[in-house]
Image: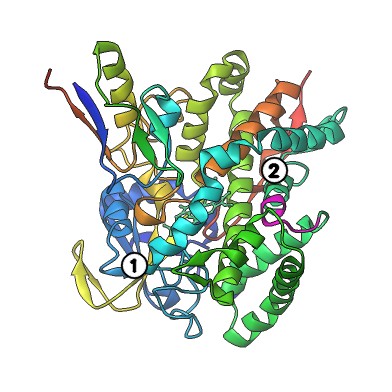
Amino acid sequence: MTDKPIVQDFATDWDHTDPAWVNNPYPIWDELRGRCPVAHTDRYGGAWFPATHAGVSAIANDTENFTSRTVVVGNGRPQEDAPPAPIGVAPPITSDPPFHQIARRLILPAFSPGAVNALEPQIRALCAGLIDQMEGHEIVNGGTEYAQFIPPSVIKQMLGFPAGDEDLFREFVHIILEGIDLPIEERIEAFAPIEAYFVQQIEEHQENPRDDLTSYLLNVEVGGQKLAMEHVFGTMVLILVAGIDTTWSAIGASLWHLASHPDDLARLVNEPDLMPVAIEEFLRFYAPVTMARLVKHDMEYLGCPMKENDWILLGFPAANRDPNVFEDADKFIIDRRENRHLAFGLGIHRCAGSNLARLELRCAIEEFIKRFPRFELADSSAVTWAQGQVRGPRNLPIRILA
Amino acid sequence: MKVLIDADRCQGHGRCFSLAPTLFEFDELGNGVVIGDGRLDSQTLELARLAQVNCPEHAIEIDEAP
Ligand code: HEM
């Protein structure tokens, strides 16, 4: 990571990797919302950050003026090596219409509520098993002993990858999400083991097809033709990347909240029926994911002089705190009745895995509080938050109370 | 009174069928669909409104004409 100057003014020089933003972005976004609804920075070769719900939804719904060709902000201009829209490296997230719809529809049935709900017993058993290992300890780590293990195991199962490779997946996700900062040659080098792993899995599935997502992608036909190998590969990588850090962050942030808000923890333990509504409030308040777009052509948009290939960072988490849309937006209200949050995005790219993510989050929290109805942060200064476009606690020491 | 889902707006967030499973279900892609003809009485109207105010895409419409 390069040494960058500390941000003095987020309206004209924002940076989502600045320590102030990483540690606590919410006051920054509140200020931006009041001052200039779309902040600008010359960093990253030029980028915009809409902090209001109106700004985020306008751009998320506008595929005429913005492209999803690259969705992770990198240093300098967008990667010259990124295959052009409409397909992109990782369909459907990097695809634009009309191809986007084809790539998305292919995977939606695998993530429909009916399909993912079948995984519930297995997810619960996984959570309970992790908790068994923590039983009897005074201090447990909600991040490194719990949250981080849940999503990789589920994704492994869906893609049909070998058991025991979960550590490798976390490593891959790290390389992909952080590697964006590297020069192209280094990025290609860092990516080589990931490519080799996926190619091996694909070949293994070609020899032994079975009932999993990898075999499905290899065999499904669109207009009488199988998918291009780059498409299969890109979608597999996407599912791995999109499914792991995100959900791990949501589980961690929810545990962090409960560990620091004993009243909410007590309510959730005593009123289990609140869980579905509480899950939505966790997702609104601690939405972990921001996603990027690229400006397609020079234009004046929302009063801003945007240039072709400027980045847009879509602040879904900032939109979720917009007081124009949410009553008491800056308060966590565990039984909030109206909650049109954007944690899973908005428009055609709505998170394809949202049903699975909700299921994992609900099982993880329910199982944890069932076994440990009282707990608190063991050392709030030791908690670290992941930087970048996925935000959540990584180190989360929790003291279990009697 | 009737509830309907604008299929062009719905993106499958799944809030309606989670909050009001007696009024909405999901199709094979996970998008929301109204069960039956969507007719509402005074009780189901409340439930439909709850789904409406939780739909991020503003895809749920309620026709309150009797
Ligand atoms: C709490 C956890 C999660 C959050 C907050 C989250 C958030 C998001 C967001 C905001 C988008 C929209 C991206 C954009 O507009 O460019 C997205 C897209 C996507 N997510 Fe998730 N996600 C989560 C978990 C998952 C899981 C578990 C999976 C699958 C295993 C998944 C798969 C996807 C896919 C495939 C897309 C691309 C959809 C498209 O472009 O049509 N996500 N996610």
Residue with the most extreme left position = B65
Residue A196's disc number: none
Please state which of residues A265 and A36 is positioned toward the viewer in this rendering.
A265
Quarter of image, res A358: top right
Question: Residue A344: where, in percent of width, then height?
Answer: 45, 47
Residue A98's disc number: 1
Question: Residue A42: where, in percent of width, then height?
Answer: 38, 74
Q: Quadrant of the C terminus of chain A?
A: top right
| Residue at 28 percent of width and 40 percent of height | B59
Q: Amino acid at mark 1?
A: Pro
In this picture, which residue range is highlighted in magenta? A156-162
- Give the side of residue A98 with respect to residue A162, left or right: left
Residue topped by disc 2: A147
- Give the side of residue A71 with respect to residue A255, left or right: left
Question: Residue A19: where, in percent of width, then height?
Answer: 55, 58
* Residue A157 falls within the magenta-colored stretch: yes
What chain does badge 2 belong to?
A
* Residue A278 falls within the magenta-colored stretch: no
| Residue at 30 percent of width and 79 percent of height | A308
Quarter of image, res A58: bottom left
Looking at marks 2 and 1 on the same chain, the residue that comes earlier in the sequence is marked by: 1
